[in-house]
Amino acid sequence: MDGIQIIDQVISAVRNQWEDALDVITHAFQPETPLMEKYIKIMGIGFRCLIENEINGRNFLRIEEKAKNLMDTCKEPIILIARYVQPSVYGALRKMGLNFADTAGNYNIQYTKGKKMIFYFSHTGEKAPVNNKKNYPVFQEAGLKVIFYLLQAPENVSKPFREIKEYSGVSIGTVKNVIDELENRKFILSTQKKRVLKERRLLLDLWSENYNQVLKPKLLLKQLDFRTPEQKEKWKEMALPDGMLWGGECASNLLNGYLTPEFFELYTEIPFSNLMKTGAIRTTEGVINVYQKFWKGSTMPYVLIYADLVSKGDGRCIEAANKLLKDELSDFE
């Protein structure tokens, strides 16, 4: 579900709670601005939309950080628009003063001017809308591999299907189906000359969430550990065999030194047993997760580092992910 669809369904859901006052929430609009931000009007007041798919305890810290940054820089009131907001985060959203509304009909919205409250209305308790297409093909294993390639560079979406196929390791038919589906969801705009990837930040977050739920667990090969605490401390001095790359917290540390790793992730295209040759690793289950490398190339893509970091759900990793977004992935903001 893309951003426009989510907004439209939220408007319908809130209106259903106000049968005799349809002008409570009137319409969505998108003024001509460089970033093409989206707004909705509530009681005649324009609210800047922060659009997400689902808000839950696992992704709340990331969304909280993004919302705080927006609230600090935006002059207009903010509202979090989502397909579904889990009841477990209602209190946290209210505490930080963030309005929210979802497609199920849950909402908590207030507008103040100075110290005076102009309006406030709330309704919660509605269950998540039934989704008969919960596992969209576009966010299943093959689709995630295609989207991963598209996200790495804006020009990738205009590459021939055969080139996308070669990098993604899927069939040409799958590439076509994914491109068509993304076009249907307004993530791709096709012209006679080229294709353009739109809503890249929303797609990045949707990809990250589904990658961690669908694809990443299937890639796990082995859990390992360092032989000694000293070797763990000196992990950067360990010479990785060719065909292996650090991911997650380690990759973030190698980029800017900002994050000291507590959990270690490796991606490999060679047997993980090659790690034993370093003398620093043992086969006991521990703090190292080894995953099958699923892309071509000898570098760790920033998009994947971001997805690894946001999956952790703790403040230090969220801070590192936001730094990555501001620096290496600045074209997504």
Image: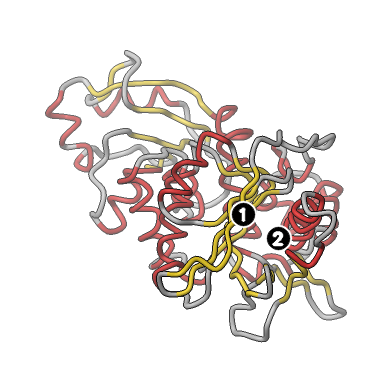
Q: Position of residue 100 (x, y in %)?
A: 59, 53
Give the answer, above or below, for where 214 lies relative to 163: above
Give the answer, above or below, for where 59 lies relative to 178: above
The residue that appears at 64% across and 52% down in the rendered structure is 101
Q: Secondary structure at mark 2?
A: helix
- Does residue 116 appear left or right of residue 185 in this picture? left
Quadrant of res 256: bottom left
- Which sits in the foreground, 289 or 237? 289
- Which sits in the foreground, 41 or 241? 41
Q: Which circle marks residue 264 in the picture?
A: none
Q: Disc 2 or disc 1, which is closer to the eye?
A: 1
Q: Position of residue 236 (x, y in %)?
A: 22, 43
The residue that label 2 is drawn on is 3
The residue that appears at 41% across and 55% down in the rendered structure is 65
Q: Secondary structure at mark 1?
A: strand
Q: Position of residue 273 (x, y in %)?
A: 40, 22
Q: Position of residue 186 (x, y in %)?
A: 78, 64
- Neighbour class for label 1 at 10 Å: few (<14), some, many (≥20)? few
Residue flagged by tag 1: what amino acid is it? Phe
Distance between the Cα atoms at labels 2 and 1? 23 Å
Q: Mark 2 and mark 1 in contact? Answer it, CB < 8 Å.
A: no
- Which sits in the foreground, 152 or 106? 106
The residue that label 1 is drawn on is 121
Residue flagged by tag 2: what amino acid is it? Gly
